[in-house]
Image (spheres, rainbow, N blue to C red):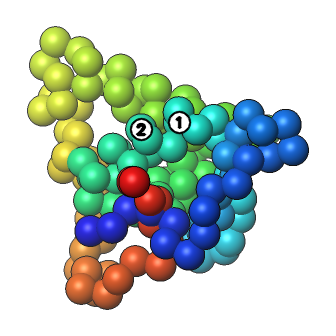
Amino acid sequence: MSIGLASEDPRPDENGSLVIRNVKIHGLRTSVRLEPQMWNPMIQICRCEFCTPDDVCSYVAERKSPRASLSSSLRVFMLDYFCESSAEDGHSSSGHGQSKFMSQQEDHWLMRDISTPRTTSFRTD
């Protein structure tokens, strides 16, 4: 499974400190600005959870505070995800790798044709 933005290169914002990437939140295109170091953890989460960045962004967008930005909420989600995995019981007790954090999408793979190439994915090279 390819996890990267296939059609576009990451682009820095005006200040050069953040990377802007396009994602889809429940099918609606939007931009997310994160530090370059935050995109690799996103890729790791997607690989462990067998999902796309769009799935993670949609999940976080559903649960964030109305006053919080999506970028900030994604940072908090990624921090929480890896903090849980560093607990004594590690990944197994936190449900990582089992798509547990996306439990509302139990039929995730059944509803999606997994043989269809992803249109939104992050480059890993």
Quadrant that contains the N terminus: bottom left
Q: Which residue is mark 2?
A: 41
Q: Which residue is mark 1?
A: 38
- In this rendering, the answer to whether 111 lies above or below 107 is below
Q: Position of residue 60 (x, y in %)?
A: 54, 48
Q: Position of residue 22 (x, y in %)?
A: 65, 64
- In this rendering, the answer to whether 91 lies above or below 87 is below
User: For this rendering, which residue is in front, 81 or 40?
Assistant: 40
Q: Amino acid at mark 2?
A: Pro
Residue at 73% across, 47% down: 12
- In this rendering, the answer to whether 65 lies above or below 87 is below
Farthest residue to the right: give it: 14
Query: Circle 1 — which element?
Result: helix
Residue at 26% across, 59% down: 50
Q: Amino acid at mark 1?
A: Met
Query: Circle 2 — which element?
Result: helix
Farthest residue to the front: give it: 125
Looking at the image, do the residues carrying marks 2 and 1 touch, with CB atoms under 8 Å apart? yes
Quadrant that contains the C terminus: bottom left
Q: Label 1: few (<14), some or many (≥20) within 10 Å?
A: some
Residue at 24% across, 85% down: 115
